Amino acid sequence: MTTPSTTRRLHPVTLQQAAEASPTLAGLVQLARESGERLDAIRLLIPGPLRSAVRAGPIDGPDWCLLVDSNAAAAKLRQVVPALMAHLCDRGWQVTSIRLKVQTGQK
């Protein structure tokens, strides 16, 4: 007697195919895409010298996280967070808070 697991052929799949086949992975891919879209929407509101220090982070419901390279960049970015939130809300995203997480030494 053979079981389905022993008769199943294994074949390579792309990451995109795996994500589409799994509801959990598909949800994560969608959140990552939306996070990038949010960052693109606010990029011009971030002071020029800080733009390269900011990356899109995770979305947790109405909360969004931005990953920042240094404490100094986070301190300066905190000053424009209200404007960033207002801009995102104007564009249809329900954002009630933006957290800043400092990640030093990672790029």
Image (tube, rainbow, N blue to C red):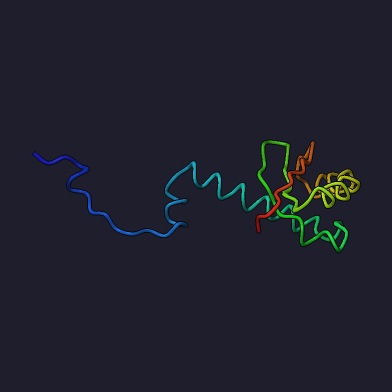
Camera-nearest residue between 32 and 94: 32
Q: Residue 27 location, x and y as percent? A: 55, 44
In the displayed orientation, state which residue is furthest to the left. Answer: 1
Residue 58 vertical position relative to residue 55 in the rendered view, above or below: above
Which residue: 81% across, 55% down?
Answer: 42
Give left or right: position of 6 versus 43. left
Question: Which image quadrant: the C terminus?
Answer: bottom right
Corner quadrant of residue 86: top right
Which residue: 42% across, 60% down?
Answer: 14
Camera-nearest residue between 74 and 29: 74
Give left or right: position of 74 versus 101. right
Which residue: 47% across, 42% down?
Answer: 23
Question: Which image quadrant: the N terminus?
Answer: top left
Q: Residue 64 location, x and y as percent? A: 72, 42
Corner quadrant of residue 82: top right
Q: How many marks?
A: 0
Residue 99 vertical position relative to residue 42 in the rendered view, above or below: above
Q: Residue 10 location, x and y as percent? A: 26, 54
Q: Residue 38 location, x and y as percent? A: 73, 52
Which residue: 83% across, 59% down?
Answer: 50
In the displayed orientation, state which residue is furthest to the front. Answer: 105
Give left or right: position of 67 versus 91. left
